[in-house]
Image (cartoon, helix red, strand yellow):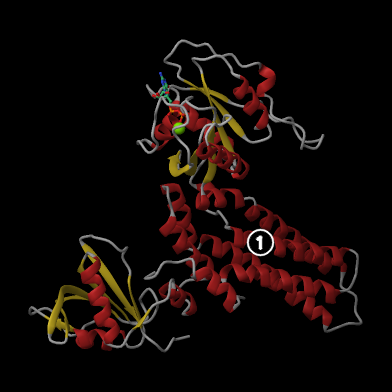
């Protein structure tokens, strides 16, 4: 599918920099560039005369005036990002030159691109499938190298290949079922039924395997929400700074300094961990601090992990006990801080037991809360704490293979529907409920899988996905 109009946008971030790039894509990309670009120097050509994938030095001209000195890259369809004709103009970085070049390009006949429209065209023109287009967003937003690596694997089509193989298998099964439906008088041969059943079961196992990567996918994309709590002055803000490797939060010996919550992403063993520093929990005297305490409780409720900090140089207080009890049901790590000072703290072991209240009797007994001793002044124990955080949120090794597939929430939803369809089809087959039903459920599953790569997709879904992009991508 070729789109009829030609779009343009600044593809580099807004702000000051060495270069900014204005990207133009569409059937008139070369004509638009021709109107505003004047080649300089003996190797430079007009866009209409330029060979594909060549770069030309010259200037952008508007009403006879030079707007900027630029390099212009000409890439003719189809070997381009969008599979349309693409021109990229590298001009001087900075808000004004980039904006003026863009304005000139728009005056020359291009339309301002919508967020994600270049990548949407790449999808519509078949250069990327939907899972790969999503990987472009993941890659742009990646906050650790591990997250970027996972996005790169998806962009290279690793997930898409697994999904397409699975879908092909089910299409084959459907073809068998439909062929059988053409002979309604004959019952399905037992051998054929067994073969079909085996196919469905293999498919189900593969779906389960993919679904198991959802946790990793969520962590890599969104980070692990981790809230740092404890009574005032135990060293919460100091710990945040230690884990970030820089001073972000104000550290003060005056209790109650941190009144608002601070959110920063740290890279912990490759995992993006969103650390939330909170106001200390205590019976706040003044109004602003009370609000801070309220926000702390909300932050704890939303968090996937709680880091509860205690002051090792002081005896356990009533407030400590209260919060040890209050957060017992959360996944948590206890940090005993200030090990550089003489130790006065002791914690009764019963306070380290995780709460059992909301667990089923058959569930395995959870391990006691991990305790890590650190000093935020000397940095002692911080590496052990990082291990403990990784251990708490990520099961097993973090290996390259583990992140080759890491599905997102949309893939997860589609796979759950596919699983239901296949399970239903298998059930119908087993109980001899008729091949029509088997065919219907198989088709549902095939469609659900097709949504992941965009083989079956609605305009609404496309809007949702591409609106997450920034302009220029
Ligand atoms: N000796 C010592 N002092 C610390 C340590 N960590 C923090 N502090 C001090 O404890 C005080 C409170 O620290 P802060 O991080 O603001 O605590 P918060 O109120 O829990 O955020 C400050 O004076 C810090 O310098 C530590 O490991 N050892
Ligand atoms: Mg603080």
Residue 372 x, y percent position in the rendering: 53, 23
**Residue count near mark 1 (Cα–Cα under 10 Å), binned few <14, some 14–19, many ≥20:** some
Q: Does the residue labelled 1 lie within 8 Å of ligand 2?
A: no
Residue 360 x, y percent position in the rendering: 80, 37
Where on the image, by quarter, is ligand 1?
Answer: top left
Relative horizontal placement of residue 94, taking residue 132 as reference (left or right): left
Residue 384 x, y percent position in the rendering: 48, 27
Relative horizontal placement of residue 411, taking residue 440 as reference (left or right): left
Quarter in which the C terminus is drawn: bottom left
> Is residue 309 depicted above or below 212 in this figure?
above
- Residue at 69% of width from left, 34% of height from top? 329
Relative horizontal placement of residue 353, taking residue 267 as reference (left or right): right
Relative horizontal placement of residue 17, taking residue 407 as reference (left or right): left
Quarter-of-image position of residue 75: bottom left
Residue under circle 1? 413
- Residue at 45% of width from left, 23% of height from top? 381
| Number of marks present in the image shown | 1
Label 1 secondary element:
helix
- The answer to whether residue 431 of the structure is visible from this angle is yes
Residue projecting furthest to the front: 286
- The answer to whether residue 53 of the structure is visible from this angle is no
Residue 293 x, y percent position in the rendering: 56, 37
> Is residue 298 depicted above or below 178 in this figure?
above
């Amino acid at each position: 599918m070729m789109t009829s109009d030609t779009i343009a946008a600044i593809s580099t971030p807004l702000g000051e920099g060495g270069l900014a790039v204005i990207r133009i894509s569409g059937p008139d990309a070369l004509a638009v560039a021709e109107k505003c670009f004047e080649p300089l120097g003996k190797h430079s050509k007009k866009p209409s005369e330029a060979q594909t994938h060549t770069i030309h030095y010259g200037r952008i001209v508007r009403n006879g005036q030079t707007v900027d000195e630029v390099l212009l890259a000409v890439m003719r369809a189809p070997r381009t990002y969008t599979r349309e004709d693409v021109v990229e103009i590298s001009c001087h970085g900075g808000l004004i030159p980039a904006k003026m070049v863009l304005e000139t390009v728009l005056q020359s006949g291009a339309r301002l691109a919508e967020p994600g429209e270049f990548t949407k065209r790449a999808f519509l023109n078949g250069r990327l499938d939907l899972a790969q287009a999503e990987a472009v967003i993941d890659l742009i937003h990646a906050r650790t190298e591990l997250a970027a690596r996972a996005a790169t694997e998806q962009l290279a089509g690793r997930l898409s290949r697994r999904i397409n193989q699975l879908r092909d298998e089910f299409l084959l099964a459907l073809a068998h079922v439909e062929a059988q439906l053409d002979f309604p008088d004959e019952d399905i041969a037992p051998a054929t039924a067994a073969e079909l059943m085996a196919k469905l079961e293999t498919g189900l196992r593969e779906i389960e395997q993919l679904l198991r990567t959802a946790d990793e996918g969520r962590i890599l994309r969104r980070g692990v929400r981790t809230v740092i709590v404890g009574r005032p002055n135990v060293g919460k803000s100091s710990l945040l700074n230690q884990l970030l490797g820089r001073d972000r939060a104000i550290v003060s010996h005056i209790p109650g300094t941190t009144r608002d919550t601070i959110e920063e992403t740290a890279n912990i063993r490759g995992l993006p961990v969103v650390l939330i520093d909170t106001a200390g929990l205590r019976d706040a005297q003044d109004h602003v601090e009370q609000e801070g305490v309220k926000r702390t409780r909300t932050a704890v409720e939303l968090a996937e992990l709680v880091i509860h900090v205690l002051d090792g140089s002081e005896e356990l207080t009533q407030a400590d006990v209260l919060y040890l009890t209050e957060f017992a049901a959360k996944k948590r790590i206890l940090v005993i801080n200030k090990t550089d000072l003489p130790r006065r703290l002791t914690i009764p072991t019963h306070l380290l037991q995780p709460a059992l209240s909301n667990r089923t009797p058959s569930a395995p007994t959870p391990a006691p809360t991990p305790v890590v001793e650190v000093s935020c002044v000397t940095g002692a124990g911080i590496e052990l704490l990082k291990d403990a955080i990784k251990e708490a949120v990520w099961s097993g090794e973090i290996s390259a293979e583990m992140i080759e597939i890491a599905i997102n929430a949309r893939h997860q939803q589609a796979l759950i529907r596919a699983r239901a369809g296949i399970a239903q089809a298998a059930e119908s087959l087993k109980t001899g409920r008729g091949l029509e039903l088997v065919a219907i459920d198989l088709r549902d599953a095939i469609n659900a899988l097709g949504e992941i790569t965009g083989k079956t997709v609605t305009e609404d879904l496309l809007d949702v996905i591409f609106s997450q992009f920034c302009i220029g991508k």
